């Protein structure tokens, strides 16, 4: 693994560049965390210029360094009797506003960099609620996919056997995230109760309503996204009634976004997971989707097998953005022009996301990464070329064709 340097990022304002240089030095092999810090420092630079007391008071130096980083071993036994070992994390980033708050993610991609990046951004997300909540994040590189209920229970119990000592309703309040739903939260909370001999309903959010959970908590995020989209359309004297809606994902948020969009008169036609996505022109059957994902825990392809009106697309491109693929000889017939892509983006209405995903992504030739372009973000140059900027602020010319 290579480490990043300041040359890999667009220069920041003089007031914040030294802080970022320290992050690069201390977190040399954590690219996701580095990028998150760079984005935030770049965004708040104008505020810091008007309020130099924040810089002089060392606020930034404390902001980018977690208060506590917990990394631990999670041994557990699979159904074949073999010992497995995973790595657990909890980053308690900031408790300035209140107890640490942030989800637990179980996914093989989890590492220290990703958990720090998520915990860092959680500080600002939670601050916006005005509820006095700090920021944190945790998880493990454990992959629950394909594991039995008993294996997941044993893993969760082992995970909590270490983490419990760092949690509490006045200290750190975790929740679910990718790979951690109601089942996993039940196993985790049950083990917490066992080892602490306490029933603290406030130390874990996302619990079932029968054992301390809140009503409508399960539906809240998906419903909220749809309500937000409805209000966005209302500004233009429009509504969801009669609209075709594309939804990314097939977990908790996606299921209830589809349900609420349908109730408001829209037709949700897509759902996805990491293997691809389905398109159902007659509208996603929420009951079938819930059966597959919440009960059977099947892949999204199974939806297409059971629903005659649906088709499965196995390309792992999610329907939450338009992806303009890399230029390659002989592929021009697969691609639209950037002009046409921009026209499609401008015609889309009401794009909302809890993940803030881009709407139109261009793959820059030459290995320079991807650029997020909107209706006017790519500037047309002579001979059909476009000028685009990468994340570091470097300009590139995108040719009209590779053929």
Image (spheres, helix red, strand yellow):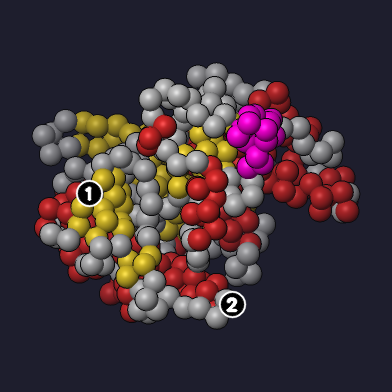
Say which quarter of the image contains residue 223. bottom left
* Viewer-closest of 189 and 314: 314
Q: Quadrant of the C terminus?
A: top left
Q: Nearer the viewer, residue 144 or 377?
A: 377
**Residue 334 placement: quadrant:** top left
Residue found at the very far front of the displayed protein: 383
Res. 34 in view: no
Q: Residue 215's spot in the image, x, y percent?
A: 37, 78
Q: Secondary structure at mark 2?
A: helix
Task: Provide the residue designation for mark 2.
Answer: 235
Query: Image check: 162 left or right of 149?
Result: right
Binning the other alpha carbons within 10 Å of mark 2 as few (below 14), some (14 to 19) or many (20 upward) gives few
- The spot of residue 82 in percent (x, y) is 16, 30
Read off the magenta span: 378-397
Height in image: 294 above or below 150?
below
Instruction: Name the one closer to the observer, 133 or 387.
Output: 387
Does residue 76 sit above or below 245 in this rendering?
above
- Is 7 on the left-hand or right-hand side of 129? right
Q: What residue lies at 46% left-to-right and 30% top-to-bottom? A: 326
Above or below — where is 4 with respect to 125? above
Q: Note whether residue 310 is visible.
A: yes
The image shows residue 136 at horizontal and vertical percentages of 54, 51
Residue identified by numbered label 1: 312
Q: Secondary structure at mark 1?
A: strand
For residue 153, side relative to residue 340 (left or right): left
Side of 132 relative to 72 (left or right):
right
| Residue 40 within the segment the image draws in magenta | no
In the image, what residue occupies the spot 67% across and 33% down? 382
Residue occupying image coordinates x 53% and y 53%: 343
Q: Earlier in the sequence, mark 2 or mark 1?
A: 2
Task: Provide residue 336's location: percent of width, then percent of height.
Answer: 45, 42
């Amino acid at each position: 693994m290579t480490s990043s340097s300041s040359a890999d990022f667009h220069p920041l304002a003089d007031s914040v560049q030294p802080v970022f240089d320290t992050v690069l030095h201390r977190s040399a092999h954590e690219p996701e965390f580095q990028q998150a810090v760079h984005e935030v420092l770049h965004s708040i630079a104008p505020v810091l210029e008007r309020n130099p007391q924040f810089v002089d008071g060392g606020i930034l130096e404390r902001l980018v360094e977690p208060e506590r980083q917990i990394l631990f071993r999670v041994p557990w036994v699979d159904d074949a009797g073999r010992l497995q070992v995973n790595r657990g994390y909890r980053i308690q980033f900031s408790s300035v506003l209140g107890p640490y708050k942030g989800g637990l993610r179980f996914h093989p991609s989890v590492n220290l960099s990703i958990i720090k990046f998520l915990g860092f951004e959680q500080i600002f997300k939670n601050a916006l609620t005005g509820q006095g909540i700090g920021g944190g994040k945790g998880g493990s590189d454990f992959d629950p996919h394909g594991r039995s209920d008993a294996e997941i229970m044993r893993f969760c119990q082992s995970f909590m056997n270490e983490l419990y000592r760092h949690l509490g309703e006045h200290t750190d309040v975790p929740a679910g995230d990718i790979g951690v739903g109601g089942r996993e939260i039940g196993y985790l909370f049950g083990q917490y109760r066992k080892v602490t001999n306490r029933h603290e309903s406030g130390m874990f959010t996302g619990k079932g309503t029968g054992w301390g959970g809140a009503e409508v908590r399960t539906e809240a995020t998906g419903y909220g996204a749809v309500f937000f989209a409805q209000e966005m359309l209302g500004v233009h004297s429009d509504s969801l009634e009669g609209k075709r809606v594309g939804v990314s994902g097939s977990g908790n948020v996606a299921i209830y976004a589809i349900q609420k969009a349908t109730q408001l008169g829209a037709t949700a036609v897509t759902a996805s997971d990491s293997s691809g996505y389905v398109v159902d022109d007659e509208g996603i059957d929420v009951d079938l989707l819930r059966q597959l994902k919440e009960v059977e825990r099947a892949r999204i392809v199974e939806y297409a097998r059971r629903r005659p009106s649906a088709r499965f697309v196995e390309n792992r491109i999610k329907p939450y953005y338009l992806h303009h693929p890399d230029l390659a000889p002989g592929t021009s017939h697969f691609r639209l022009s950037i002009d046409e892509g921009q026209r499609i983006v401008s015609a889309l209405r009401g794009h909302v996301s809890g993940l803030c995903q881009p709407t139109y992504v261009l793959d820059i030739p030459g290995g320079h990464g991807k650029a997020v372009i909107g209706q006017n973000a790519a500037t047309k140059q002579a001979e059909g070329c476009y000028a685009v900027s990468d994340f570091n602020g470097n300009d590139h010319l995108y040719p009209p064709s590779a053929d």
